[in-house]
Image: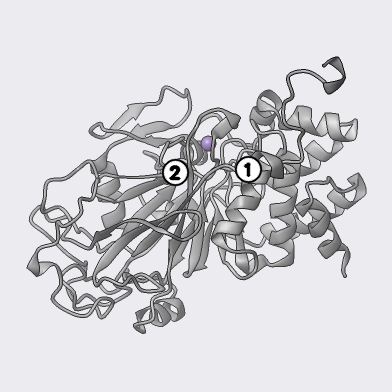
């Protein structure tokens, strides 16, 4: 067993690894991350996760529900640390897995992966408590500076895999044991005036399906060339008024502490909101952005969906703006008291042949000049990828290795 595998085993048991080993790990991780672009290209199938916030035992539950590494290809959208009691073990385990299986683990930066924020919200204190010095915190912060700012998922399918037992399903929601909670059929976008993004069961009309799903001949994809499901952009927070293309993100000099303003700051801090255009964020960093901003950005960049994290949602995930953006939240019972469930989002691999095409091409549909699903307002409503949400609850108390709260010791009785 290599040192790295030993470290993984030790961290899986929620035991910190010695300081020199952290130093070595962070060094290796940095060498790996420095080679990645600001926007990492990831090929489906992939399981996309939101905030973890040091809830180690819930991260273990996430792996139980979503599958272990390297069997499952994971993309984590940041906020690994702060708030929970085990930021150190959570982040170091993810980092070990990244170094051990670089192609099966993608980590992008959240607004908490910052010196300033971790000093206030727990990670700094936790390192000091567990090691007696700030060295390990410093090593980890040096890694934060090298994390990618986003990812583009290519080759996602617009049919579920394994297939649903009903045709034409776009969304399936499962519980932590794989049991079906609900599902929603594919439908035309922008035709039902539904800007809340809530899908309603039984809303599919006969024109929803004009060809085999994934063939590029279905009603949604309009027979366009390229991946029928379009690309998915993953960022921690959201969009920036300074960023109108994905390529613009690639030009940022990211190897630094998260700035207080500017494009890099916005990508990590912004939130979608029911407004027109841009608004000031109550967070004091980043911006609020409305459906119109997302629609134009997705159209311009040939995206079918933006996946982001950053906001607690009680149901674990929330689709907004006619399913053009989704928030994924992966910290159940956040801060051990919010009572929310968590979720991960699975995108399956397109097997119609277009997925392979887009992989070798590297740039889905952008050169084709043909937009899918061009509708009345002249803005594309691209066919969304089929998505399966796995919703899960906090790990049971007895798996946490913490003594359950006892009111009084027995010997008083
Ligand atoms: Mn955040």
Quarter of the image for the C terminus: give it. Answer: top right
Q: Is residue 25 left or right of residue 61?
A: right
Does residue 302 appear anywhere in the picture?
no
Instruction: Name the one closer to the observer, 42 or 399.
Output: 399
Residue for badge 1: 396
Instruction: Name the one closer to the observer, 10 or 102.
Output: 10
Q: Earlier in the sequence, mark 2 or mark 1?
A: 2
Q: Residue furthest top?
A: 412
Label 2 Cα crowd, 10 Å radius (few <14 / some 14-19 / many 20+)? many
Question: How far separated are the C-alphas under marks 2 and 1?
Answer: 18 Å
On screen, 323 above or below 409? below
Look at the numbered disc 2 and give the secondary structure of its residue. Answer: loop
Residue for badge 2: 316
Look at the numbered disc 1 and give the secondary structure of its residue. Answer: loop
Looking at the picture, the colour scheme in use is one colour
Q: Is mark 2 within 8 Å of ligand 1?
A: no
Residue 119 in percent (x, y) is at: 71, 26
Q: Is mark 1 within 8 Å of ligand 1?
A: no
Q: Residue visible at 86% across and 54% down?
A: 24
How many circles with numbers are drawn on the protein?
A: 2
Q: Is residue 112 left or right of residue 340?
A: right
Q: Quadrant of residue 354?
A: bottom left
Residue 289 in percent (x, y) is at: 32, 36
Q: Residue furthest bottom?
A: 353
Does residue 51 appear anywhere in the picture?
yes
Q: Is residue 97 left or right of residue 204?
A: right
Q: Residue visible at 24% across and 70% down?
A: 168
Which is more foreground, mark 2 or mark 1?
1
Quarter of the image for the N terminus: give it. Answer: bottom right
Tags 2 and 1 in contact by the CB under 8 Å rule? no
Q: Quadrant of residue 194?
A: top left
């Amino acid at each position: 067993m290599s040192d790295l595998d030993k470290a993984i085993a030790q961290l899986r048991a929620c035991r910190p690894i010695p300081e020199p080993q952290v130093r070595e790990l962070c060094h290796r991780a940095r060498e790996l991350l420095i080679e990645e672009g600001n926007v990492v290209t990831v090929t489906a199938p992939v399981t996309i996760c939101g905030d973890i916030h040091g809830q180690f035992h819930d991260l273990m539950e996430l792996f139980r529900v979503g599958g272990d590494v390297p069997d499952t290809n994971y993309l984590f959208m940041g906020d690994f640390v702060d708030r929970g009691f085990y930021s150190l073990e959570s982040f170091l385990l993810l980092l070990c897995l990244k170094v051990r299986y670089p192609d099966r683990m993608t980590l992008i930066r959240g607004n908490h992966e910052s010196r300033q924020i971790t000093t206030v919200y727990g990670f700094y204190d936790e390192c000091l408590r567990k090691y007696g010095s700030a060295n390990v915190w410093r090593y980890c912060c040096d890694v934060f500076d090298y994390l990618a700012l986003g990812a583009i998922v290519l080759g996602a399918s617009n049919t579920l895999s394994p297939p649903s037992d009903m045709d034409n399903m776009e969304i399936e929601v499962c519980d932590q044991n794989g049991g079906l909670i609900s599902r929603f059929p594919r439908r035309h976008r922008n035709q039902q005036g539904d800007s809340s993004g809530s899908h309603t069961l039984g809303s599919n009309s006969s024109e929803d399906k004009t060809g085999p799903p994934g063939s590029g001949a279905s009603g949604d994809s309009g027979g366009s060339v390229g991946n029928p499901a379009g690309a998915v952009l993953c960022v921690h927070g959201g969009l920036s008024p300074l960023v109108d293309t994905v390529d613009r993100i690639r030009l940022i000099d990211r190897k630094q502490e998260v700035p207080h303003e500017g494009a890099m700051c916005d990508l990590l801090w912004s939130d979608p909101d029911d407004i027109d255009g841009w608004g000031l964020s109550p967070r004091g960093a980043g911006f609020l952005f409305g459906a119109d901003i997302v629609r134009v950005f997705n159209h311009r960049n040939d995206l079918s969906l933006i996946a982001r994290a950053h906001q607690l949602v009680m149901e674990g995930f929330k689709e907004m703006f006619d399913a053009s953006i989704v928030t994924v939240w992966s910290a159940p019972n956040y801060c051990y008291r919010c009572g929310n469930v968590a979720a991960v989002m699975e995108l399956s691999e397109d097997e119609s042949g277009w997925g392979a095409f887009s992989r070798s091409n590297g740039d889905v549909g952008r050169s084709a000049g043909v937009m899918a699903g061009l509708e009345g307002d002249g803005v594309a409503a691209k066919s969304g990828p089929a998505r399966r949400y796995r919703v899960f609850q906090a790990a049971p108390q007895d798996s946490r290795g913490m003594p359950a709260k006892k009111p009084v010791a027995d010997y008083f009785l």
